[in-house]
């Protein structure tokens, strides 16, 4: 009897272990599938937020302008920490919206898209309607601040950092809103994984690149001091290329703002979305159809972005003028 009971017990244990092995395999497969889904959604979200990323790079690199060379990296690091705090606020807020007010995701995306278009159009308007004298005066004041021992450089740096962190909050909100729209139908765990992943990747990516960009001139000068003719030539090339890189990032960031912002607005209006899709499909019948189809769709998204940006700038300008007249009357 005892032997029979022992054998039965061992058989039960073997059955349980077999069941555990099967459930472990199933769980592992589900975890792998979830990891693949998270990876795919993260890639899609990263692509959709690339427009904000380009402008974020140029804007943050410009924010550091005027800080003394030895303080550039500490300032970038301080702004990066502020950016992580921003995202530590925005990610839980986005998850709460997704859990309790999912209907708000599309309106928030539309607002974010309109703001992107507004920023892009405002940058173009500023470029063509204002002279460079204000920018030159600002650069001159930064240089004087660094050269004048009477100026409190700690306070100067704090102002630069506060301004950069405020700007980062807006751009981070846009990134999180676009990402939330990408994972709106995913499970809560996937939303947490993708939003957290994008927050970390974007922060490390942006501020790592910003640190590299602001130190390009130092690298060029270091190479220029080498004896090798090749090193000197490379150093001169880097120094000459650095301003052009900044200009390229600024232009690419502005163009991407219209593409991304316009695309968000187009997707939010079903009739407009179908019209753009139809035009892209029609262009897809041309030779090299896939190329033309994508190009036409993107160009139409950009046109919508430019028009929307112009309208928002016009409304904001009109409101500001009305407020100015009201204040003057009082």
Image: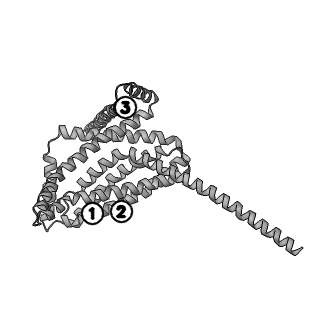
Which mark is drawn over residue 75?
1
* Residue drawn at the location 23% of the way across and 53% of the way down: 62
Q: Position of residue 213 (x, y in %)?
A: 24, 56
Assess whether mark 2 and mark 3 are in contact (beta carbons under 8 angstroms).
Answer: no
**Crowdedness of circle 1 by 10 Å Cα count: few (<14), some, many (20+)?**
many
* Residue drawn at the location 82% of the way across and 72% of the way down: 6
> Which residue, given by chain and number where applicable, does mark 2 sit on?
81
Label 2 secondary element: helix
Q: Is residue 106 above or below residue 64?
A: above
In-image side of 236 versus 302 (left or right): left
In-image side of 150 versus 161 (left or right): left
> Which residue, given by chain and number where applicable, does mark 3 sit on?
297
Q: Earlier in the sequence, mark 3 or mark 1?
A: 1
Spatial CA span between label 3 and label 1:
40 Å
**Residue 108 visible to an observer of this rendering:** yes
Q: Position of residue 60 (x, y in %)?
A: 27, 54
Question: Relative to the observer, which residue lies in front, 277 or 151?
Answer: 277
Q: Earlier in the sequence, mark 2 or mark 1?
A: 1
Q: Earlier in the sequence, mark 3 or mark 2?
A: 2
Q: Position of residue 130 (x, y in %)?
A: 17, 40
* Residue drawn at the location 62% of the way across and 57% of the way down: 27
Label 1 secondary element: helix
Quarter residue 73 falls in: bottom left
């Amino acid at each position: 009897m005892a032997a029979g009971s022992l054998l039965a017990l061992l058989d039960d244990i073997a059955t349980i272990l077999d069941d555990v092995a099967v459930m472990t395999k199933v769980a592992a497969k589900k975890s792998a599938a979830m990891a693949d889904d998270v990876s795919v959604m993260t890639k899609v979200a990263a692509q959709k937020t690339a427009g904000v990323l380009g402008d974020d790079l140029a804007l943050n690199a410009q924010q550091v302008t005027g800080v003394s060379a030895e303080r550039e990296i500490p300032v970038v690091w301080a702004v990066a920490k502020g950016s992580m705090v921003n995202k530590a606020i925005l990610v839980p807020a986005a998850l709460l919206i997704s859990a309790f007010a999912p209907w708000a995701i599309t309106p928030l995306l539309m607002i974010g898209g309109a703001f992107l278009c507004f920023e892009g159009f405002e940058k173009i308007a500023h470029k063509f309607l204002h002279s460079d004298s204000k920018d030159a005066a600002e650069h001159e004041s930064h240089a004087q601040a660094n050269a004048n021992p009477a100026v409190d450089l700690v306070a100067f740096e704090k102002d630069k950092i506060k301004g950069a962190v405020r700007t980062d909050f807006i751009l981070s909100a846009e990134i999180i809103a676009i990402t939330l729209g990408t994972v709106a139908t995913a499970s809560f765990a996937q939303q947490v994984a993708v939003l957290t992943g994008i927050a970390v990747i974007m922060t490390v990516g942006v501020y790592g690149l910003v640190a590299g960009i602001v130190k390009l001139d130092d690298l060029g000068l270091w190479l220029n001091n080498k004896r090798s003719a090749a090193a000197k030539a490379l150093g001169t090339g880097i120094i000459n290329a650095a301003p052009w890189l900044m200009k390229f990032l600024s232009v690419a960031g502005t163009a991407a703002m219209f593409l991304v912002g316009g695309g968000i607005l187009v997707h939010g209006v079903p009739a407009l979305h179908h019209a753009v899709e139809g035009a892209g499909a029609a262009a897809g019948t041309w030779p090299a159809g896939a190329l033309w189809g994508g190009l036409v769709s993107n160009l139409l998204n950009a046109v919508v972005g430019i028009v929307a940006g112009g309208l928002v700038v016009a409304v904001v300008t009109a409101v500001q003028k009305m407020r100015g007249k009201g204040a003057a009357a009082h």
